[in-house]
Amino acid sequence: MESVGVREVWAILVELPGPWLWAAFGLAAVWLVAVGIAFLRGAAWRRALWPSVIVGLATGLVGLAIIPSLTGASFQDLTSVVDWVILGLVSLGLAGDATLLLWPFLALWFARPLRR
Amino acid sequence: MSRHTGSKHSGSKHSGSKHSGSRHSGLRSRSTPQIPERRDALRTLAAGLGAGALIGTGSGLLAMVKPLAAAPATHATRARIVIAGGGAAGLSAAARLSARLDGARITMVEPSARHVYQPGLTMVGCGHWRPDSVISSTARFLPQGVAWKQDRIAAFDADNNRLVTRDGSVLDYDFLIVATGCSLHYEGIEGLDSGALGRDGVVSVYAGPEAARATWAAMSAFAETGGTALFGRPVTDIKCAGAPLKMTMLTDDRLRRQNTRSRAEIVYCAHGNSLFGVPVVADVVETLFRERDIAVFRAHDLVAVDRGAKQATYQVGERRVTMAYDLLHVVPPMRAAEPVRDSSLAWQDGPFRGWLEVDPVTLRHRRYPNVFGIGDVNGVPKGKTAASVKWQTPVATENLIATIAGHDMPGAYDGYTSCPLITGIGRAMLIEFDYHDRLIPSFPFIDPLTPSWSGWLMKDIFLQPTYNAMLRGKL
């Protein structure tokens, strides 16, 4: 398969519907701030990892269940292995996104001062 | 800038598909490295999908993304370039030329301030998209530095390198790109005009977003009442030849979802003996129609509609056949816009009579070497789709730039076109083919002849962003 250019991929991504694009940028900005704060506070990254992964996987499973219907399709419309692979990859991507997104916030949570 | 000076093709009159001084000599010519490889758009889509879906895992399709390449060099010129038409072809040509030419005086002539994403009209017609999903503005995509003459073209005077607009303005040019698209000729069917659409069971997704919305309303009503639904296409060349088939299958799908299929008879009136121009695809569509109990009448050409009596009349060979309908989806006869038809730019005879007389490979006019054509207006064997525009625009614009620079024309169009043939909500066949009816799938792992969710995803989510990127000259 031929490679494609970063320029072309970017050109398409920025043409995705505005609200989705701005939501993604906004989320990314919040995430970066959380990472920055957690980093500065020396937050508990390791303790936060597995809860993030578990919640992320749960998100991926929910995605697996509802993504076809979000496109107007049903599971009966997934007629080929490729369809299922795409659904799996998208769900996996969603799980990864959710994990990465949660991680700094959970790290901050785990790093909070405990009350006595 | 003198008119088309320096080109090896200057003043040459082409005949047939051979091009003196060109590296290309027939339909089988392939794109050169200077032109983006064909089907990159859909591959780019896949990478975009991968980028979005796999960004969390940091693997997968992103691995095949190549490093950022340098932008193509610009060429200094004072040439006056007029782009006739500001639809998909005109806007994408404007974007590419303005980015590649330094100092060129580019004018686009387009009357409409509204831009319609026409590939989405079937999605509106089946109720999956809202009409405003396909509406944007011409100004949104007009590149900086390109003058916009918001008027209709009244006449072309190719012998004197000028055109005249309705308000009497005369635009002289050194180079002309004709991108005036198709003209819908509803009046060519007796008893019909575009104002009749959406009433009395007569609908057509081709007429625009509002007509597509009315199609959905009529289809929904038909799904309640049942009756006879007639579909078909005219004998003329049409844009998006898959659309009538899509609307037939989408209506069937709608009825089945509502459990009222048994109340309806669906009839497809083919203009010839085949349901689609590519034989292998036609076979699949025949099978799908048979499985869904969709009747096929062959060699039927819609010639008259009696809206009061709800009867459609077809020319079948020497005789006329009249059928009653409850829902009639009309695909109007199509032809090049009147100023093209009435000018010396058009084919004067042959199967493409009235359409723009361009070479099918270089997309340069066969008699006027400073004129190029892009999109639906071209009198070529295939390619009245937005996907064709995607592949024609780089060819035509690079060949135009090479002509300005006095170089050989590097671009060759192989007839690539694409039809995401929707077979129902949630499924589509991603069919891509060329002048020779060869299937040329962009994704070898997706079977183009099997309706799939992946094909539907492409149509539903990724093609419009790709189209928009094309209008901006980014693809």
Image (cartoon, coloured by chain):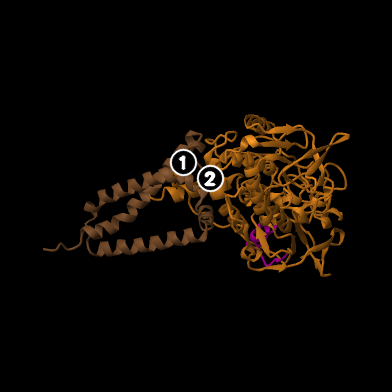
Chain colours: A brown, B orange
Disc 2 is attached to a residue of which chain?
B
Q: Nearer the viewer, residue B267 or B96?
A: B267
Q: Amino acid at mark 2?
A: Leu
Cα gap from disc 2 to disc 1, whole angstroms: 10 Å
For label 1, the residue is A86
Question: Is residue A90 at least partly visible in the picture?
Answer: yes
Instruction: Quarter of the image for the N terminus of chain B: give it.
Output: bottom right
| Position of residue B452 in the picture relative to residue B146 (left or right) | left
- Looking at the picture, how far across and down is residue B198, in whole percent? 71, 52
Rendered position, B245 above or below A42: above
Q: Nearer the viewer, residue B189 or B285?
A: B189
- Looking at the picture, how far across and down is residue B250, in whole percent? 62, 42
For label 2, the residue is B457
- Looking at the picture, how far across and down is residue B14, in whole percent? 82, 47
Q: Nearer the viewer, residue B441 or A82?
A: A82
- Looking at the picture, how far across and down is residue B388, in whole percent? 67, 47
Q: Which mark is residue B397?
A: none
Q: Which residues are magenta?
A: B90-108
Crowdedness near tag 1: few (<14), some (14–19) or many (≥20) residues, C-alpha within 10 Å: some
Disc 1 is attached to a residue of which chain?
A
Q: Is residue B107 magenta?
A: yes
Q: Residue at x 45, y 37 (%)?
A: A84
Q: Are marks 2 and 1 in contact (CB under 8 Å)?
A: yes
Q: Secondary structure at mark 1?
A: helix
| Position of residue B99 in the picture relative to residue B231 (left or right) | left
Q: Quadrant of residue A26?
A: bottom left
Question: Is residue B421 at least partly visible in the picture?
Answer: no
Q: Is residue B209 magenta?
A: no
Q: Amino acid at mark 1?
A: Ile
Rendered position, B280 above or below B76: above
